[in-house]
Image (cartoon, rainbow, N blue to C red):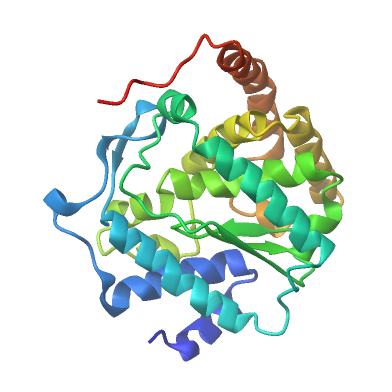
Amino acid sequence: MLSLAGIDLWKRRHRGYRYLAGSILAAALLVGIGCAPAEERGTGGQGPGRRPQQLALTPEQEFELGRRAYLQVLSEMRGRILPGDDPRCVTAQHVTARLVKAAGIEPLQREINLHVRGYRFDWEVHVVQSDQVNAFCLPGGRMIVFTGLMAVAHNDDQVAAVLGHEIAHALAHHANERVARDEFGHVSFLRGKAYDRAQESEADHIGLFLVVFAGYRPEEAVRFWEQMERRAAGGQIPEFLSDHPSGAHRIRNFQTWIPQVLAGKKAFDEGRVVPTAKR
């Protein structure tokens, strides 16, 4: 079992459940999941965008890591989880379903170079009462969204921009990759570095593809991050921005990527991009 005392200590040291989730992942590793031998691990070599990527956990270990962490998070948040018929839950679930459907498009997976075959995903989302402007997705696809985020997102397109980013972390196996990068498999999490900035930009890029292929308006992603920048300039730094690239940098990225992603979606809709024939 995970140590509640250890989690309480972490909560006193760090604000926000993004960091709590990271500490739970670290604790899960320490209580028996461990790292798999190289020949048993998941993808190795090329990751998203065909960059080098080394993973430490097998697909089953990655899924179990997220499952155990999710159960602990839900236990910690007991009493603040909104019922499924709450309008904010309905919105989060609807947006997630559309994004997940887009993630299953084979030509899109091929374009991004996502490795999802053989991995288990249990796409589940809970909305939790909290003023935090934040959300996170654990390995295996289970998500927590805070009501603070739902309050500042002006429409479903903006909700999709954030959830697409978080779903992208799971699809790209970023937590698994962080384990592989650290000598002992838990150092980064214990330092509160859930993901590095390169992974955050990668999640932005993948998430934008999901947003567009799910039928949402990508320009709303720019509007959302502009709004976050204004909040930060006013001294209200959202938890979501604490370990991400600067808002100005990410907005420039989106403005560069949007025409490219829209062109890819147009090609797909017109049948100029087809699935790879199954062998």
Q: Residue at x 30, y 54 (%)?
A: 59
State how many labels appear.
0
State left or right for residue 57 relative to residue 107. left
- Quadrant of the drawing holding the C terminus: top left
- Residue 130: x and y in percent read 76, 71
Q: Is residue 17 visible?
A: yes
State left or right for residue 222 relative to residue 13. right
- Quadrant of the drawing holding the N terminus: bottom left
| Quarter assignment of residue 89 | bottom right
Q: Residue at x 79, y 49 (%)?
A: 232
State left or right for residue 82 relative to residue 258. right
Residue 243, placed above or below residue 7: above
Residue 131, placed above or below residue 75: above
- Residue 131: x and y in percent read 80, 68
Q: Is residue 236 visible?
A: no
Q: Residue at x 40, y 60 (%)?
A: 188
- Residue 77: x and y in percent read 64, 80
Residue 83, placed above or below residue 101: below
Most extreme residue toward the bottom, as rendered? 5
Q: Residue at x 61, y 69 (%)?
A: 17
Q: Quick one: 12 or 59, which is closer to the camera?
A: 59
Q: Quick one: 142 or 10, which is closer to the camera?
A: 142
Q: Quick one: 278 or 3, which is closer to the camera?
A: 278
- Residue 194: x and y in percent read 49, 58
| Quarter assignment of residue 107 | top left
